[in-house]
Structure formats: C-alpha cells, structure tokens
Amino acid sequence: MSPAKFLHELVGSMSQGAAGNPTVAMIEAAFAHHGVHWRYVNMEVTPDDLGVAVRGAKAMGFRGFNCSLPHKVTVIPHLDGLGESAAVIGAVNCVVRRGDQFIGENTDGKGFLKSLETEIDPKGKSVLLFGAGGASRAIAVELGLAGSRLITIVNRSEKRGAELVTLLRDKLKVDAELVVWQGDYTVPTGTDIVINGTSIGLYDAVARLDLALDSLKPGMVVADVIFNPFRTRFLDDSAARGCRAIDGLGMLVNQGIVGVEYWTGITPNADVMRKALEAAMGL
Ligand code: NDP
C-alpha cells in the first residue's frame, strides 16, 4: 500500500480559543505570494489532547506548527528536541520538522530582535525591559544571546522578575539586574533601548506605563510588544520626546517571517505579510 500523499505541505497553529487567528491570513499570504503549495491551518487543541495532536501532526506529515498559550511550555515533553533559545527560555511557539524529528523553537524573541535591528544593534547596549512574563523572557534571552551589555528588568512581581534575572545571569552570563516596579520609574541616563514587554496597553490605547516621561531622552530606541492597538500611548509619548519608536505589529510579522523561513527555507516578503495581517485585524 502506498503512503498517503498530500497535495500541499502542511503547517499549522495549535491554540485554544483563538478562532479567526489573524496570523493564518499572514502566513497564507506569504505562501501565495511565493507560489508555494503549502497550507497553514488553525487547529483548536485542548490541553488534554496536546500529546495526541502532536503525534497526529507528525504522523500526517506536517512540516511544523506554531503553538500559543496554553501550550507553549506543555508541548516540550512531546517534542524530539529544542533549539538554543527555546531551551534557555523554556517555552516553544514554533515547531519545525527536521528529518524525522519535531524540534521546538521560540520565534517571539527572534521576531522582536529582527524589528529592533531595523533601528539599533543591541550588541553592547544597555537595555531596560518592563515585564518578566513569557514575551519578556523570550526578548531578554535573545538580547542576551545578541550580546547586550546590561539588561535591567523592571517588574511588578519580584518573584517573576528575579527568576528572569537569575536565568540571564546563570545560563547566559549576562549582566542583569532587577528593579521591583513601584510608582513612576525613572529611566537611568545612558540607557540605549527601552522596551514594554508587559500586557499594559493591550486593547487599551490610553493605558499608561508608570514611567517618568522626562527620563526618556531623544535618540533612545523605544519598543512595545503590544500589537493591538499597534500605536500605543507609550510609543506616542516616547516619539513626542524624540525617541525612535518600534511597534509590536513588526514583532508579530517578524516571528511569522522566522517561522516561514524555518519551515520552507524561503525568506518571505515582509510587506505582503504585514498588509495581510493588518487586513485580517481590520487595521
Ligand atoms: P504574561 O502574562 O506572561 O506577562 C505579563 C507581564 O505584564 C508580566 O510581567 C506582568 O507583571 C506584567 N503586567 C501585566 N499587567 C500589569 C500591570 N497592570 N502593572 C504592571 N505590570 C503588569 O504575558 P506575555 O508575556 O505572554 O505577553 C505580554 C504581552 O505581549 C501581551 O499583551 C501579548 O499580547 C504581547 N505579545 C506580543 C507579541 C508580538 O508578536 N507582538 C508576541 C507575544 C506576546 P507581573 O509579573 O507582576 O504579573
């Protein structure tokens, strides 16, 4: 009996409660633009079914898949190995078939860095990062791997902040420090890059970061992970102070670009993907 054959190569997104995931339109636009016969399909997977879903994807010849919350950590035992940053971060959002193995990668931080590098090379720079959750962890690890000189984590919860600082110091030998966030934070003189890695501003264009705005100086590079709205109050306030602002939509597009590169070997057209994402999000 001949093995089952697909008309298309398949990749997917394993998520829960993410029907209408706008990244589907973005990835499929890239496939269409480059004329490759691939499909990207969204699959609702419950935590209980994750293991069987991963085995099923492998058995059916999927070339990989993205996974989002709540699967980013729990998917790891079901995989054959991890890429360098995914191993340090301890979370996976992109799985890639290499030979007969499913390898977990983390493209969140890589996507962020691709965006950041349009304005500044983080090597040797002093970085201030608000937040210590999943997105911040991915960003901080990539900054560490890229050779940032100092990473200061400013986080509301001391426990989560301390865990991230310990990870940066112990696993990457990066100079990192923690500030527990209380009241308006003053950005130290000499900071090169300021990042909002928290969820403050998500679906809320007027949400404010507790930050002394006059400590933001012209020339600093300021970036936000928030992609909806993609123009946040933090970015507007920073741009008004002469900072160079980078939005979170670029990070989302770039993590998609890294995923397509991993799966297909093609470097996709960023404009096509951003336009498709904006259309799917109604922007
Ligand atoms: P987590 O829940 O893991 O972390 C949330 C972080 O925000 C924590 O550091 C938390 O602090 C902090 N935080 C939340 N509310 C407040 C508040 N009111 N005051 C101070 N700190 C606060 O979320 P993720 O890291 O996974 O995601 C963060 C954001 O990044 C989300 O909005 C998500 O949409 C976005 N994101 C964007 C991506 C992109 O491609 N642009 C990719 C991935 C995520 P504490 O530890 O004290 O609770």
Image: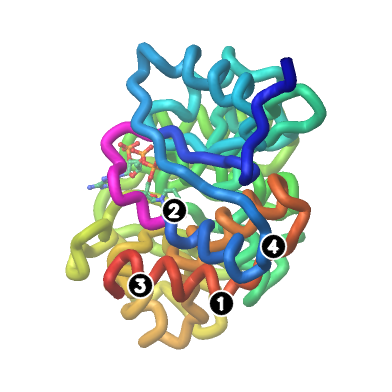
Q: Amino acid at mark 4?
A: Pro
The magenta-colored residue range is: 15-22
Q: Which mark is residue 24?
A: 2
Q: Verify whether residue 272 appears in magenta.
A: no
Q: Which mark is residue 271?
A: 1
Q: How far is mark 4 from mark 2, CA to CA?
A: 30 Å
Residue drawn 81% across the image and 28% down it: 99
Residue drawn 64% across the image and 54% down it: 37
Question: SS at mark 2?
Answer: helix
**Badge nearest the viewer, 4 or 2:** 2
Mark 4, residue position: 122
Q: Which mark is residue 279?
A: 3
- Quarter of the image where one finds residue 97: top right
Question: SS at mark 1?
Answer: helix
Question: SS at mark 4?
Answer: loop
Q: Where in the figure is residue 94, as x and y percent of width and height?
A: 58, 38
Q: Amino acid at mark 3?
A: Ala
Q: How far is mark 1 from mark 2, CA to CA?
A: 16 Å
Give the mark count. 4
Comparing 84 with 263, the one in front is: 263
Q: Going from the N terminus, do you reach mark 1 or mark 3 first?
A: 1
